[in-house]
Image (cartoon, helix red, strand yellow):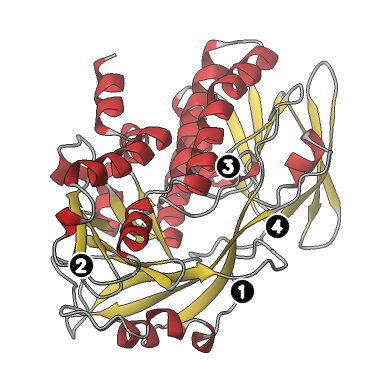
Amino acid sequence: MSVVIVGAGIGGLTLALQLHKRGIHCRIYEAVATLEPLGVGINVLPHAMKELAELGLMEPLRAAGVETSNYHFYNRFGQLIHAEPRGLAAGYAWPQVSMHRGVLQQILLRAVLERLGPEAVVTGSRLVFCEQSERGVSTTFELANDGSFDTVVSEVLVGCDGIRSTVRKQVYPLPDPLVYSGITMWRGITRWRPILDGATMLYAGWLETGKVIIYPVSDKLDADGYQMMNWLCEFYVPPRTASADWSQPGDLADFAWACADMHFDFLDIPEFVAAAQFVYEYPMVDRDPIPYWTDGRVTLLGDAAHPMTPRGSNGAGQAILDARVLADQLSTNHDPFVALHQYDAIRRPQTAAVIAANRTQPPDAILREAFERTGDQPFADINDVISKQELEELSRSYRMAAGFDQSQLDSDTAQ
């Protein structure tokens, strides 16, 4: 079997490694001419770390990032609402690792080139058309270097080409608009002294008045003892044109008010945000789940299949899970039609549940509950506002929907 993968993002690279592990020939075609480590922070949750560990990538990932130890939730007055351990500290067999997205992509890329060879990734190749027959898929790419065209024939084509996927448009040609969540996010990287234990993810505030999330993406300190931190600030913004462009520059003046009063005992958040090396602005968008991802020998993976808002640190994780399931099906079903439809049947309902959870009951719903029950006022005792059991259940409900609750992973391991 031969597989053409469109897109050398996290999903496409992971799929290549999974297929190679099973002896299935594949090649990745990427539109950009040079793959550079772009982006900001990303979290590799335990369910995704489990898959990457089985590909032999545990140690380089742990060395490149920070093993998240705790989540802390605060109101905008700096009062602790809830704290819970994460990853190994919570008893998982796999850590949760926070890192720079570009670093994760480069680790995957190096592994692909080392294991599959230097010809495994073809850059500067933009998909323009694909056509199926009973014997395979003929895919045409425009070459960036001279504008000529190259046609490749394979038994299977997988679109891993992101939220603006060209392959998705060919698989599902019906109207499929971006859906704006009503929330706009500003993101950046700041070098700062380690916060709390240097491995805690911090949530503060809520969307009506401004919400902030901060976490480290490297545990390496520079000569001044500063650590690389990822942060985001988000709040409700009226309907607007949504472009799904992660690299749109942002302006501090547009969002600084949302964290202006967050002067916590352990961190002055306005000062921290103002020290950012750069800022990106991103209207948080997704797409409604579609009724199928697969058309004959062509299927979708990652954001091309199930674009979701970046809540819960779970978009990349779901792409990594897609890759393993698709590789399993292709290796156990010699008929690619059967394999692709089995993959579709397994993963599409699971990712639709995550999209729904991101929209209605995201992992930071703890902040929403505290905000609404206190009327956005300081509290004397959080237990008078919401019980510990309720807080824990709010957190667990998202982990269950996203597939990384400890009980789920323990059950998978036992099987």
Labels 2, 1: front one: 2
**Sequence-wise, which precedes: disc 2 or disc 1?**
1
Q: What residue type is labelled 2?
A: Phe
Residues marked 4 and 2 touching at CB (< 8 Å): no
> Which tag is nearer the camera, tag 1 or tag 4?
1
Which dot, 4 or 2, sits closer to the camera? Answer: 2
Residue under label 3: 120
Q: In this view, does 40 lie to the left or right of 8?
A: left
For disc 2, the marked residue is: 379
Task: Identify residue type, mark 3.
Answer: Ala
Q: Alpha-carbon neighbours of circle 3 within 10 Å: few (<14), some, or many (≥20)?
A: some
On the image, the x and y values in percent for residue 129 come to 84, 42
Q: Nearer the viewer, residue 351 or 48?
A: 351
Give the secondary structure at mark 2. loop
Quadrant where the C terminus lies?
Answer: top left
Residue marked by disc 4? 124
